[in-house]
Amino acid sequence: MRFIKKHYSYILFFFFLCFINYFLIYADFSYDTIWEYGMSHAFVLGQLPYKDFTLVTTPLFIILFSIGLFIKDNLFVFLLESIISYMIMYYFLDKLIGKNKSIFILFLCLFLFKSFIASYNSLCLVFIVILMYLEKNNNNDYLIGLLLGLLILTKHTIGLSIMLCTFIGIRNISRISKRLIGVSIPLLLFLIYLLITNSLFQFIDLTILGLFDFKNSNTLLISYVFVLSLLLLLITIIFMFKNKKEILFYYVLGSFAFIIPIFDLNHFTFLFSIFIIPIIYIYNEKIDFKLGPYILVIVLTILNLGVRLDSYSNLYINPFNHFDMTIINRDYDRIHSNIISEMKKYDNMIIISDSGSFYSIILDKKLDYFTIPHRGNYGYNGLDKMKKRFNKLEDTYIFLDKGFYDIIVHDTKNGFDTGIAKSQFDTELYEYIINNSKFVSSVEGFDIYYKE
């Protein structure tokens, strides 16, 4: 009883995270998480990122979150690992801003709880909060450098941006040198891994050279998010001038890498949440909202449940292996079952669909460069490379997501501002495959083609 009284906020936050992850979000599948889980699942199967399947960022997230999967390879375990990482973040938030951590949690809940989706962005957020705590409570530059190195290995663009901004913030050669030593340890180990696995070239191509293809293909500019981002940048700069020695604002400045080149609410939520931390830290003693933020979180949760209420009327536990603790719509289950039954008829097969990872996991099929068919995900001049990969295929059946493709074409043609229309699905690769293979049959929105 004494333990519960002392740690009640941690216990409540844990159950809140479980509710958010297992009901509010995953009753309505997030394919970002399925893609990430698929890569961790592939790592458990012995596949290597860059060499065996595409990955456009550094791999710490999928490697770290594969640990639990060696015990039980299931989405439930994968999400539990994400919850644990957020509990660690909550601990450091408590040490950094105390009772007002509830305000930060409130900001995380904005924009349909997007920040709670398990991804490399969420792990970046965890590392950034820990780093902010260390900056204010620990002067060990070697340790901070080590954490910066792990942040770079989680998402290199964000990690490098924050590292450079904080170096500008401390403006001390001796401290910067110590941090660089700390940074170099995980980066050197990663370099050794790339050399041993003979995947250094693929890493450079997919994560560095491929950025040119990715930026040109996937720049997404939602006008009001862009305006909000500029406003946030202006406010950050003003606070930096008024608090010239406050290092936390340099973390905010570096965190603008979250939203470049994709200015959408999902990425903006992470930036916005990080922005609020130094504000709370500076005015911590003057802020006393008590139960206000908690009440607003409850209200947001109820409103979100109300918005999605119709989708909950036809739900049950997903029976598929690796997803058997996931809530799914019964109609989708029927469709998935028919597609999977058809896929099981073919040994040599590739899938061109945003849900390719989902089906590959269920079938225990190894991932490949076709599994996530997104523009800019294949390295520099990637589309030509994928065409060459396809031309090398022999005696292969291709499941093409015609339903998804048709929606993209329809919405784009009619100028509809939808998430599907703005998706990264590579319609050019889809069309190239159709023009260079033979139609076989259809099943539940998928067309099946054969490449001799």
Image (spheres, grey):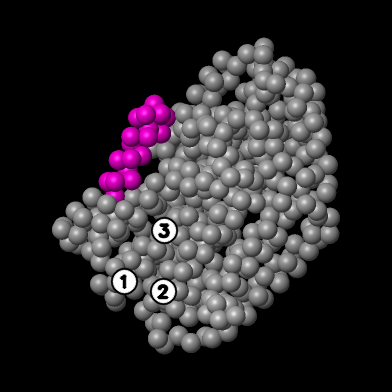
Q: Is residue 359 above or below residue 449?
A: below
Provide the major secondary structure of the magenta segment.
helix
**Is residue 188 on the magenta stretch?**
yes
The residues tagged by marks 2 and 1 sit, at their Cα atoms, a distance apart of 9 Å
Q: Where residue 218 is drawn, which disc sits there?
A: none
Q: Are marks 2 and 1 in contact (CB under 8 Å)?
A: yes
Q: Amino acid at mark 1?
A: Asn
Closer to us: 268 or 176: 176
Q: Residue at label 1?
A: 137
Q: Is residue 82 above or below residue 344?
A: below
Residue 271 screen position, x and y as percent = 46, 62
* 97 with respect to 166 (left or right): right
Q: Where residue 95 is drawn, which disc sits there?
A: 2
Q: SS at mark 3?
A: helix
Answer few, some or many: residues within 10 Å of disc 2's Cα (few below 14, many 20 plus, some between 14 and 19): few
Query: Which stretch did the figure color magenta?
Result: 183-205
Locate the C terminus by quadrant: top right
* 11 with respect to 250 (left or right): right
Residue 213 screen position, x and y as percent = 46, 36
Q: Residue at label 3?
A: 127
Task: Write down the quadrant of residue 315 in the picture.
Answer: bottom right
